[in-house]
Image (tube, grey):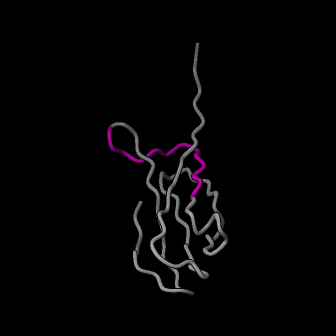
Amino acid sequence: LDISNPSVSAGGSTSVAAYIVNSDGTLYTQQATVNFNSPCIAASTATLQPGASVQTSTGIATVTYQARGCSGPDIITATASVLSLIHI
């Protein structure tokens, strides 16, 4: 994850980007859904815009994290789901 400003005060915001890469290090450019979460998001003391689930076909999913009463460190995670086709 790439976080533009890792120290956000109450009411502040920062950009968070998740990069989905292939095994060779290139960006995954097929349809994927990235789900972002953190303890503060789960407790509704932080929000994400446009939402916690973002679709991308560029290999980069970006959200804006806004602290709304979260105090202390918050660990943000991102999980990618990709469509896998098997040809037989």
Q: Residue at x 52, y 64 (%)?
A: 62
x then y, percent, for residue 49: 63, 71
Q: Residue at x 60, y 36 (%)?
A: 83
Quadrant where the N terminus sits is bottom left
Instruction: Identify the magenta region.
Output: 24-36
**86 in relation to 19, above or below:** above
x then y, percent, for residue 11: 57, 87
Characterize the magenta stretch by its predominant secondary structure: loop
Quadrant where the C terminus sits is top right
Q: Residue at x 55, y 73 (%)?
A: 65
Q: Quadrant of residue 51?
A: bottom right
Count of labels in the image: 0
**82 in relation to 79, above or below:** above
In the image, is residue 28 part of the stretch drawn in magenta? Answer: yes
Q: Residue at x 41, y 69 (%)?
A: 3
In the image, is residue 1 part of the stretch drawn in magenta? Answer: no
**14 in relation to 79, above or below:** below
Give the farthest residue toward the top: 88
x then y, percent, for residue 47: 63, 72
Q: Quadrant of residue 19?
A: bottom left
Give the farthest residue toward the front: 72
In the figure, is residue 32 to the left or right of 73?
A: right
x then y, percent, for residue 40: 58, 69
